[in-house]
Image (cartoon, rainbow, N blue to C red):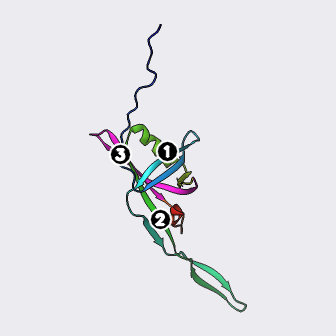
Amino acid sequence: MAAPVEVLAPIIYNVKDPCVNPVMLLWLNSLGGFSQWMFERKQVAEVETTLGDIYEEPFFEIETTNRTLRQRDSSYSHGWTLQTEDLTTDEVLALAEMKTTEAVYVMKQDGTTLGVIAEGITTIYNRYSKKHIFSVKINWPRDFNPERWLIS
């Protein structure tokens, strides 16, 4: 009789502090499937406001032709910086695929998703712990309040 062989190596779990502001991102990876990761929002939301564009619009009257300047309504956009820590190099490479896809979504607890724009991706390597820190700035759609959407 052959001796029993161990099939799987033991799994070690490190218990960490819970995420205070968890945000789940979902994106289309290079294999055509979806990847997901739980991030922590580390700062308050940034709100950028812009004045509306001024444009010239022809305004026709019966006797004269006048041109008037009009201004579009101003708009705003929210941006969040999300961060995750203690990552291996393989995990950072998987997360970095957000740079090359246009399909990035935030997922609520009930499973509904909303498309966002991922930009400003940064990684920091700690050579003492041999781990990475990954952060990404996401921009929500214009004139959209993410705080209200997440709690609804």
Residue 25 lies left or right of residue 129; in this view the side is right
Magenta stretch, overall SS:
strand
Residue extending farthest to the top is: 1
Q: Nearer the viewer, residue 102 or 115?
A: 115
Between disc 1 and disc 3, whose residue precedes?
Answer: 3
Which label sits on residue 39?
none
Instruction: Give how far apart the Cα atoms at labels 1 and 3 are.
Output: 26 Å
**Range shown magenta:** 111-138
Q: Position of residue 45 (x, y in %)?
A: 42, 64
- Amino acid type of disc 3? Lys
- Amino acid type of disc 2? His
Which label sits on residue 16?
3
| Residue 6 among those drawn in magenta | no
Residue 26 lies left or right of residue 128; in this view the side is right
Callout 2 secondary element: strand
Of badges 3 and 2, nearer the viewer stands 3
Label 3 environment density (alpha carbons within 10 Å; few <14, some 14–19, many ≥20)? few
Residue highlighted by disc 1:
97
Which label sits on residue 78?
2
Callout 1 secondary element: helix
Q: Are marks 1 and 3 in contact (CB under 8 Å)?
A: no
Between disc 1 and disc 2, whose residue precedes?
Answer: 2
Is 15 situated above or below 66? above
Residue 79 lies left or right of residue 144; in this view the side is left
Is 100 situated above or below 148? above
Label 2 environment density (alpha carbons within 10 Å; few <14, some 14–19, many ≥20)? some
Instruction: Give how far apart the Cα atoms at labels 3 and 2 are.
Output: 29 Å
Q: Position of residue 98 (x, y in %)?
A: 49, 48
Q: Residue at x 56, y 38 (%)?
A: 31
- Amino acid type of disc 1? Glu
Residue extending farthest to the right is: 62
